[in-house]
Image (spheres, rainbow, N blue to C red):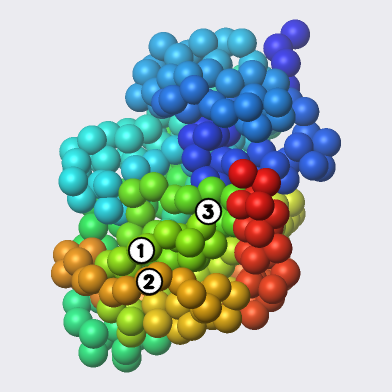
Amino acid sequence: MRKSVVLITGVNGEIGHGLVRALARKGVDNIIGIDLKGVDDFIQERTQDCLVGNILDRNLLERLNAQYEIEAIYHMAALLSTRAEFSPVIAHEVNVDGTLNLLDLAMEQAQSRGKPVKFFFPSSIAVYGLSSLEEKSSAGAPGEDDHRHPQTMYGCNKLYCENLGNYYGHYFKRLSAKDSGGLVDFRAIRFPGIISAHTLPAGGTSDFAPEILHAAAKGEQYSCFVREDARIPFMTMADAIHAIQLLMAAPQKALSQGVYNVRAFNPSAGEFLEKVREYYPDAKIDFVINDNRQSIIDSWPEDIDDNKARQDWGWAEVHDLEKAFSEYLIPEIRSRYEQS
Ligand code: AKB
């Protein structure tokens, strides 16, 4: 009999770490991870097995398909927005073709098990695209269906994959005799910028906030690449993981849609720095604007409307801006940097 497992792609990445930490705490001991690079000890110790490999490698996915019964897939592997702008074709391959491969694996698994496979997909506020600061200001907090005109390759990839997930979930091969509707139970969250106490992001555009904080904690100099008035929504990694767990645990009938916005707070970069200075008054941070990265932030909304998530599956952030610092970021960062 094949072993029943939970598959996490991009397991060594930022959200992968948070997810493995949370699932292991809940006693989940059947995680199989995939990552392009080898995983660190933290992940190794909390997973059943980790494969070094590429989600574009169909042979690797075939092996997984043959070896395991997969009950859920958390597909975290992606090239983030800044990195994707430097290599748009590679980004498209990883973000779109990679997601297609994983959705296909989910469908094969569901068909052979005869029951649905849950599929979690992290989407992003990058699916939105606002063409000017005036439009950004008047858009306020758009809902899931508004202003979806992404200006980045990453945003285009995420928006398309939301639709691919919907296709696999509801309309897969609708002309064939076999009904596959509902076999891939696709659930996605559009994340704002995420701030972790434990890891630093790589290749994103919302990275300026975690970079300010971690530089201040380490006593390092940091030049923030966006203007002080740049504003987008954020949440803590702890809340991002909490949201994933809530959505994945919700009964399917409670979900009125497949893709949900979530957010927790939306300080400007300057306001975020003020908060950081309450704890690190000597932080050596200045602002040296990178116009291209700034223009990406200007195209993302200053906030998003997450009422659907609150109504359908009880989403509520644990950390507002105040608590993010006092209850999560500062205590955990202090113990982390004091140990090292
Ligand atoms: C990025 O900046 O690319 C990501 C995101 C907002 O999805 N953190």
Q: Which residue is mark 3?
A: 188
Q: Residues within 10 Å of mark 2 (few under 14, many from 20)?
A: some
Q: Are marks 1 and 2 in contact (CB under 8 Å)?
A: yes
The percent coordinates of residue 123 (x first, y second) are 45, 54
Secondary element at tag 2: strand
Hey, which quadrant is residue 7 in on the image?
Answer: top right
Residue 142 seen by the camera: no
Q: Amino acid at mark 1?
A: Tyr
Say whether disc 3 or disc 2 marks the residue closer to the N-terminus: 3
Residue 90 in the figure: left or right of residue 47: left
Name the image quarter holding the C terminus. top right
Hey, which quadrant is residue 335 in on the image?
Answer: bottom right
Q: Amino acid at mark 3?
A: Ala
Name the residue: 39% across, 77% down: 269
Q: Which residue is mark 2?
A: 285
Q: Select label 3 or label 2 by which is in front.
A: 2
Name the residue: 23% across, 64% down: 293
Q: CA distance from mark 3 to mark 1?
A: 33 Å
Q: Residues within 10 Å of mark 3 (few under 14, many from 20)?
A: many
Q: CA distance from mark 1 to mark 2?
A: 5 Å
Q: Select label 3 or label 1 by which is in front.
A: 1
Q: Which mark is residue 144?
A: none
In the image, 53 versus 286, the foreground residue is: 286
Say whether disc 1 or disc 2 marks the residue closer to the N-terminus: 1
Q: Is residue 239 above or below residue 295?
A: above
Name the image quarter holding the N terminus. top right
Name the residue: 46% across, 31% down: 102
Q: Is mark 3 within 8 Å of ligand 1?
A: no
Secondary element at tag 3: strand
Secondary element at tag 1: strand
Q: CA distance from mark 3 to mark 2?
A: 35 Å
Q: Which residue is mark 1?
A: 222
